[in-house]
Amino acid sequence: MIEIERKFLVKSTEFKSNFNTKTKIVQGFLNSHKNRTVRVRLRGNCGFLTVKGKSSANGLSRFEWETKITVTEAEALLQLCENGVIEKYRYEVIVGKHTFEVDEFLGDNQGLIVAEVELTTEDEIFESPNWLGEEVTGVVKYYNSQLSLKPYLSWG
């Protein structure tokens, strides 16, 4: 239940020419505290409830627990969420042995595109595609829970 991932800004939309899946995601947070977040997500025709713990000092790993819920349950829970629902398209792009999840944000976070790659160890080597930009692993303002509170378009 420990998730290890690295997060990067995306410097071009070249990933769109080679993605496997594209899914619309709508998510909100029942709790966006830095030590624990509780997220409700609609992903396509599925609902999910996720609890995440505090990130490690280097931002690479943290506790994550997720369970599938019905769309009806997810829609009801979204009504209870804190302000700042996030909408985005998620593209899954296979690069070498890894799948990058590339999120193209909509609404108040439009213009922001980030990619995450999940790893099995913190020092695992992965192939870096040419559209991958600056690493922002552990940079709190790029966490979805924080983007819901202070959206990208307000950074100015």
Image (cartoon, rainbow, N blue to C red):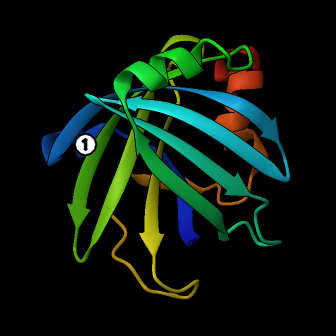
- Is residue 46 among the parts visible in the rendering? yes
- Is residue 130 among the parts visible in the rendering? no
Q: Position of residue 89 (x, y in %)?
A: 35, 29
Instruction: Choose between 20 and 33: the one closer to the eye.
Output: 33
Q: Which residue is drawn at 53% across and 30% down?
A: 112
Q: In this view, does 25 lie to the left or right of 151?
A: left
**111 w.r.t. 7: above or below:** above
Q: Is residue 89 left or right of residue 82?
A: left
Q: Where is residue 117 in the image (x, y as percent from the top left)?
A: 43, 63
Query: Which quadrant of the structure image shows residue 156?
Result: top right
Q: Residues within 10 Å of mark 1 (few under 14, many from 20)?
A: few
Instruction: Choose between 148 and 2: the one closer to the eye.
Output: 2
Q: Is residue 150 left or right of residue 126?
A: right
Query: Which quadrant of the structure image shows residue 118?
Result: bottom left
**2 w.r.t. 110: above or below:** below
**Residue marked by disc 1:** 14
Instruction: Choose between 57 and 32: the one closer to the eye.
Output: 32
**51 w.r.t. 110: above or below:** below
